[in-house]
Amino acid sequence: MGTDPHFFMTVKDIFSINDRGTVVSGTIESGIIEVGDEVHLKSANSTRKFVVSGIEISRKVTFKASEGDNVGLLISYLTKDEVQPGDILTC
């Protein structure tokens, strides 16, 4: 995949989509992310791995996003209760 190893994003908001997963939104602070890339979700108590299954920028579906983009990342198998604003996504 094309993920930049320096991908970094702070979670600003969280949404649930029935039968799809959870969307975490924020601004990419560094790096590049693509659909299918593995990300590490770092919260106060743990670090877990998930796969990005969708990306939206300004309500338009895309397959890649980079530094400065305001994005929504669809993360399958992540529930809304497992993530909070302020958590960090990295690669």
Image: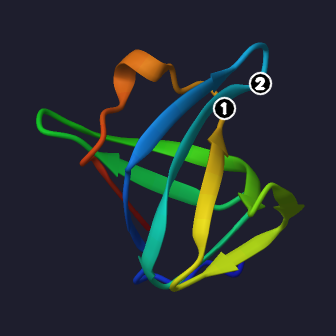
State the residue position of label 2. Answer: 20
Quarter of the image holding residue 65?
A: bottom right
Helix, strand or loop under label 1: loop
Mark carried by residue 76: 1
Compare residues 57 and 65 and report the one nearer the observer: 57
The residues tagged by marks 1 and 2 sit, at their Cα atoms, a distance apart of 6 Å
Percent x, y of residue 9:
39, 66
- Picture quarter with the C terminus: bottom left
Q: Is residue 22 left or right of residue 80?
A: right
Q: Residue at x 22, y 41 (%)?
A: 43
In this rendering, the answer to whether 57 lies above or below 45 is: below
Helix, strand or loop under label 2: loop
Percent x, y of residue 78:
53, 27
Q: Residues within 10 Å of mark 1 (few under 14, many from 20)?
A: some
Percent x, y of residue 23:
60, 38
Circles 1 and 2, Cβ within 8 Å, touching? The answer is yes
In this rendering, the answer to whether 51 lies above or below 46 is: below
Compare residues 53 and 71 and report the one nearer the observer: 71
Compare residues 40 and 83 and report the one nearer the observer: 83
Q: Is residue 32 left or right of residue 54?
A: left
Work out whether mark 1 precedes mark 2 in sequence or the reverse, and give the earlier one.
Answer: 2
Q: Amino acid at mark 2?
A: Arg
Q: Residues within 10 Å of mark 2 (few under 14, many from 20)?
A: some
Q: Amino acid at mark 1?
A: Ser
Q: Residue at x 75, y 14 (%)?
A: 18
In this rendering, the answer to whether 36 lies above or below 41 is: below
Percent x, y of residue 55:
74, 57
